[in-house]
Amino acid sequence: MSILLDADVRVLIVGITGKFGTFSVKDLAQSHTRVVAGVAPGRGGQAIEGIPVFSSVAAAMQETHANAALIYVPAMVALDAVLETIEAGCPLIAYPGDGLPVLDAMEMRAAALEHGAHLVGPNSPGLISPGKAKLGFMPSFCYAPGPIGVISRSGSLSYEACFRLSQAGLGQTSVIGIGGDPVRGVNAAEAIALFHDDPETRAIIYLGEIGGSEEYALAEYAKRPDAKPSAALLVGRTAPAGKKMGHAAAMIGSYAESWAAKVEALDRAGVVIARDLDGLPAAAASALARTMKPAA
Amino acid sequence: MLVTEAQGKALLRAAAVTTPSSHELRSLDEVRDCRVDFPVAVKAQVAAGGRGKAGGIRKANSPSELESAFDAIMGMRFGGEAPSSVLVESWLDIERELYLAVAIDSRVGGFNVLYSPRGGINIEDGPPPLSYPVGLARNFRAHAFRALLEPVESDAKVRERVISTARRLLEIAQANECTTVEVNPLVVCRGGALIAADAKVALDDAASFRRAATAAAIAAARDKAEREIRLCEEANLMLVWLDGEIGLISGGAGMTMAAMDAIDGAGAHPACFLDVSGNPTPAGFGLAFDLLDRAPNVKGILVSMFGGGLHTDRVAKTLVELLARRASAKPVTLRLNGTRSDLATTILGEAGYRNHATLEVAVADIVKKVAGARS
């Protein structure tokens, strides 16, 4: 098992004729992920790398029975593309793009919740279930199958963190990029709930940052008596307050958004803390060791 | 991005939220021509927080006091920023100060309404404000907010006025694409009227493609920004100056922060957050080296890239060419891991540079080189 994304996924790519869309067709094929359709308004009937192109998401889903969408369109038309995909009944959508107005992110999130769809993003590399499939553009060599569920606010950090976990023999059930923006589709609390319900995930690793309040969702979860063990690495210990550190949401506006406040809350809740990237594999192994052995 | 109080209050007034009568003044001539009833509040106009505690708000009882307050404030700096003007406002007859704000909250997935019956300059020292998670602005319900307010705000008249003001703040945030509209203090005057004595408004930068006012505010801020910050924005690099001695060139927001923390963990200090992932080309790296080579506090440079989609052999070629014609003698340490790093190691090796195997080894190396250069 894994969360949201399995080997039987049938992916459609919205914006398949663009640079990212065309790159993704080849990249997903190399990751053994089945791409069944592309969407580009006005380009229906064409083919890209052998993949049929449709003019609307509804037509693509009807013809190809796609059940997940990867959306590569510019921020100014992203809300339209995501709403079209949600309303066509697609249950799983990744929108990796950045620079999305927060009001549009709010509308996307509300529409996904209303239709029972899972939206990954914005400003995220997407979702991967190593050895099975990927819905995004993360570098596949960083990942290996295994028992750890990973949640990350940062793309770059998740690549190197997962590479180090994989090298240490700590593979992953799924790795979800919840994104660097303040409003997102699947958020930390929802990603935690998905990993909690996944029987193969034995520990949850959270890669967080300064700014915002998502990390407190993990602290609340870790206090539950039935919580799976968890570890966290938060970056930005040395970041000054009041300065945006690259990501829209990575800015300390109050004490609660600081590294120290979050680490204290997570530590008190029983989350294993990695002080820096170097300490992450040991923290993950330590969390995994706390897992109850399943009854033989 | 934050806008000034005067710009924020213009948005409030346009939505019929009462603000004090005011004049925005840019020169001593304007100050001398300005007719006001004393006493007045004289307030620095800067897009930065902490203004009150830094002495940017003064009381003037006469024209001469107004002139000297203007002079003093215009000579001050707030978070490095010079005031663009001062706002002169009638002094309010305050009965009580409240706190009311709407702000984007990640866990709410949208707007959160925040209220405290005791606002003012020390709001952060008191108990956390009441929170009403709204999400989409259209989901605001007066009765739901009222039920939350009843236990914390005993004055029914104030409560009702706060509810209608909160709805207006949400409408302002929605219509102008603001991520924060904060009124602190929201003043209860003798007689019971509510007046927005201050306004802290943040616009959503990402909406600039469809909000002319946001695009104009970003352009104005860029004109005022330091030259280095402006050059980086134009080249699609992200730069934040810090106080340390290790110049850091890295890729991705999360990994750049992780590298800053690793430098700190090795007992040194990062001089910057500099993310070149938006432009990992000869032009991007060239600008990064140029800025760090010129910065006097930077004693050594660490290039740390983890190639995901990025091909590190291309970065290696770029760096070899760049370092060959670089004039600065500041020590440099390189670490290119990930996609095609074997090739990168070969390319760097043939040019006489070492490619370090991990971030930690590279950090130790640059920290040692910088310490060696000093002793």
Image: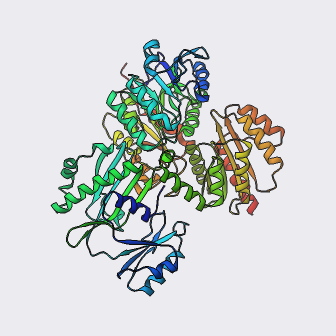
Q: Which sits in the foreground, A244 or B212?
A: B212
Question: Is residue B162 among the parts visible in the rendering?
Answer: yes
Q: On screen, A66 above or below A198? A: above
The number of numbered badges drawn on the structure is: 0
User: Could you say where residue A216 lies in the image, as x and y percent from the top left?
Assistant: 38, 45
User: Could you say where residue B96 lies in the image, as x and y percent from the top left?
Assistant: 25, 70
User: Could you say where residue B322 lies in the image, as x and y percent from the top left?
Assistant: 79, 46
In the orientation shown, which residue stands out farthest toward the top?
A: A63
Q: On screen, A69 above or below B61? A: above
Q: Which sits in the foreground, B33 or A193?
A: B33
Question: Is residue A3 among the parts visible in the rendering?
Answer: no
Q: How is the image coloured?
A: rainbow
User: Could you say where residue B275 lies in the image, as x and y percent from the top left?
Assistant: 62, 47
Report whether A232 appears left or right of B161. right
Please name the residue shown 46% across and 63% down the image.
B4
Query: In what quadrant of the picture does the C terminus of chain B appear?
Result: bottom right
Q: Which sits in the foreground, B316 or B350?
A: B316
Q: On screen, B338 above or below B149? A: above
Report whether A114 appears left or right of B83. left
Please name the residue shown 76% across and 41% down the image.
B318
Please name the residue shown 42% across and 39% down the image.
A105
Report whether B177 appears left or right of A247. left
